[in-house]
Image: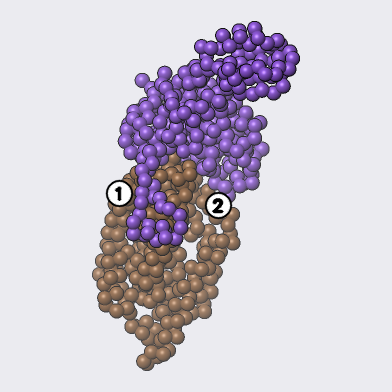
């Protein structure tokens, strides 16, 4: 039995729409048109305690809407879900005390005051016992290296400093389930790495269940053994990261370095030519043809080096979104 | 409940600290709250001079008007609430989301902000209020009985205004623009609350309408009580009406909040 169980969860928004222009604006006074947008469309999940699951998908795929429903911010249109044994959208105090959500685009901090003030209010609101609160604060401040910014007004912090403070305030009450919505959005590469290291360490140390959404593939590959690919509100893939390529990308990437320049060789007959620059050629071929194509290339050409790889995860995801196909494990 | 008892002082402390960051804005808002009653006070003083006999209108002499409008300043400050704009903005922009994630109702944060503003702005308002007393020489006929009754009356008035303003603000769960609704609310409050003129000198039909709205119990009743112009029966009768408005307001809050949160779309969060 999972810590997060989701069955056929749906969220449909009613969106007003009209053509551009004054005439359409006037017509909309009397005849308003609406469209149903299925932001989340019958998704089901079962996530066990301590798992770190990455939600991947393009803008508008339904990742954040799913997180909002699981955190109790949104009521679903249909379906069921329990997190830690609670129905999230009932918003019971006992539930909200055990979860946290970090939103890259929404601040939990008071921008007019030093971050420390927000931390103290958070500990009081969550009724964290004083000694435990102090210990959690000390630990998080050290892990996140934010000792030097606690007295600075939040609005004067850099994006990276602020995001670390957002994560700190979200974790002060030691949540069992953590929803991270774009936690590295807009951060530079170094800061992204630091945030990832921290999340990994927090999961390892506290055994918290974490659901992470991100546009950055590196977030997901660094942190999540399991990924859920969502597009148009539907789950296209749910399984181990390692299986994604195997299931969704039935091709290999063959890269060859030639000893001499070759003119007139029909690489396109071997497979899809991804790149051909000088003596370097990269081909995408079907998995079942990879061995035969490699043999043929080695026989036909003077090859200095050859590598056969699974396609980059970014390419696989891009291809999944482009084709709209998916699979469950 | 225990958690709330611990959280409220922390929220109030944070709200006070935030208010201190915006001293200039607080001063301007506080002074603006004095302008309406001060203008009304001056206008009615002039009107009395032009009235037949030149001594009073509807039982109010110039110094009675001074007392009445001075009290509307003080009571108006204690009872002020602006959540029809603030809460509306937070709902429409998705800024409510972080507060909804907390294990306590967001209204407590708004209560803390409301109390903090009133406390901080007293530093500016008390000297202004005293100055107006010196200049206008208001005529109070207030006994100890009225003073003691005024404590629950003004407290209930503040709760009525806050709760009903909040209830109205929750319309933002259903509508996108709250400015017009807010203006209508404040306009009705000016008129039917007795901020422009004591209700007792307004035409009978308007008094009847005012009795069916909450504004009368926010401004007019506490002010008349403190002026010593109400009969013992009216004092207790109107206070009972205040209690009814509070109870109904809290029930409406409970129902509308539950329905509104279901509709919350957490825009952009």
- The structure residue drawn at horizontal position 52% and vertical position 29%, both measured from the top left corner, is A318
Q: Quadrant of the N terminus of chain B?
A: top left
Left/right of residue B246 with respect to residue A302 in the rendered view: left
Which mark, by number, is residue B60? none
- The structure residue drawn at horizontal position 34% and vertical position 56%, both measured from the top left corner, is A31
Q: From where the camera sits, is residue A76 visible?
A: yes
Instruction: Give the structural element (helix, strand or loop) at label 1.
Output: helix
- The structure residue drawn at horizontal position 33% and vertical position 46%, both measured from the top left corner, is B258
Q: From where the camera sits, is residue A172 visible?
A: no
Nearer to us in this view, A159 or A115: A159
User: Which colouring convention does the figure follow?
Assistant: by chain
**Residue, disc 1:** B255
Badge 1, how many Cα within 10 Å: few under 14, some, many 20+?
Answer: few
- Circles 1 and 2: CB atoms closer than 8 Å: no
Colour chain B is painted in? brown
Distance from disc 1 to disc 2, alpha carbons, whole Å, reads 31 Å
Specify the subunit that label 2 lies on.
B
Q: Position of residue B49 (x, y in %)?
A: 42, 89
Colour chain A is painted in? purple
Relative height, residue B5 to residue A179 (above, below): below
Which mark, by number, is residue B18? 2
Badge 2, how many Cα within 10 Å: few under 14, some, many 20+?
Answer: some
Q: Position of residue B113 (x, y in %)?
A: 48, 53
């Amino acid at each position: 039995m999972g810590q997060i169980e989701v069955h056929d969860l749906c969220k449909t928004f009613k969106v007003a729409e009209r053509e551009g222009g004054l005439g359409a604006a006037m017509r909309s006074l009397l005849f308003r048109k609406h469209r149903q947008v299925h932001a989340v469309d019958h998704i089901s999940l079962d996530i066990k305690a301590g798992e770190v699951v990455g939600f991947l998908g393009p803008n508008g795929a339904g990742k954040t809407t799913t997180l909002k429903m699981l955190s109790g911010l949104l009521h679903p249109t249909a379906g069921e879900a329990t997190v830690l044994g609670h129905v999230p959208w009932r918003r019971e105090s006992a539930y909200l005390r055990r979860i946290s959500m970090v939103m890259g685009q929404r601040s939990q901090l008071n921008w007019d005051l030093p971050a420390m003030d927000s931390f103290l209010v958070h500990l009081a609101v969550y009724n964290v016992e004083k000694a435990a609160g102090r210990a959690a604060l000390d630990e998080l401040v050290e892990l996140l290296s934010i000792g030097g910014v606690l007295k600075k007004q939040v609005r004067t912090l850099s994006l990276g400093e602020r995001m670390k403070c957002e994560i700190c305030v979200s974790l002060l009450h030691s949540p069992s389930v953590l929803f991270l919505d774009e936690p590295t959005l807009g951060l530079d590469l170094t800061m992204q790495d630091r945030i990832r290291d921290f999340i990994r360490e927090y999961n390892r140390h506290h055994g918290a269940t974490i659901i992470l959404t991100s546009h950055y593939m590196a977030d997901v590959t660094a942190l999540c053994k399991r990924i859920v690919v969502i597009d148009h509100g539907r789950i296209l893939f749910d399984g181990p990261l390692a299986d994604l390529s195997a299931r969704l990308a039935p091709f290999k990437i063959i890269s060859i370095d030639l000893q001499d320049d070759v003119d007139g060789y029909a690489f396109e007959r071997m497979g899809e030519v991804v790149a051909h620059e000088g003596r370097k050629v990269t081909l995408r071929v079907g998995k079942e043809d990879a061995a035969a194509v490699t043999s043929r290339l080695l026989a036909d050409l003077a090859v200095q080096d050859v590598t056969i790889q699974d396609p980059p995860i970014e390419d696989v995801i891009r291809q999944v979104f482009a084709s709209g196909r998916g699979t469950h494990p | 409940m225990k958690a709330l008892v611990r959280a409220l002082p922390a929220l109030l402390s944070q709200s006070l600290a935030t208010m201190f960051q915006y001293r200039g804005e607080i001063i301007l808002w506080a002074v603006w709250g004095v302008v309406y009653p001060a203008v009304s006070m001056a206008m009615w003083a002039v009107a009395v001079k032009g009235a037949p006999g030149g001594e009073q209108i509807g039982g109010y002499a110039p110094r009675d008007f001074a007392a009445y409008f001075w009290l509307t300043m003080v009571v108006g400050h204690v009872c002020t609430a602006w959540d029809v704009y603030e809460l509306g903005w937070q709902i429409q922009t998705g800024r409510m989301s972080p507060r909804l994630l907390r294990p306590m109702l967001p209204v407590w944060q708004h209560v803390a902000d409301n109390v903090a503003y009133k406390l901080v702005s007293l530093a500016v308002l008390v000297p202004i209020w005293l100055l107006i007393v010196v200049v206008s020489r208001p005529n109070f006929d207030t006994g100890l009985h009225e003073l003691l009754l005024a404590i629950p009356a003004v407290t209930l008035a503040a709760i009525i205004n806050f709760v009903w303003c909040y209830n109205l603000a929750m319309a933002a769960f259903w509508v996108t623009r709250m400015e017009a609704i807010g203006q209508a609310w404040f306009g009705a409050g000016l008129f039917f609350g007795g901020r422009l003129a004591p209700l007792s000198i307004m035409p009978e039909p308007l008094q009847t309408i005012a009795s069916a709205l909450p504004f009368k119990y926010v401004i007019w009743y506490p002010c008349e009580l403190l002026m010593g112009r109400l009969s013992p029966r009216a004092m207790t009768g109107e206070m009972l009406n205040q209690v009814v408005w509070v109870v109904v307001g809290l029930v409406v809050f409970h129902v509308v909040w539950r329905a509104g949160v279901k509709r919350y779309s957490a825009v952009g969060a």
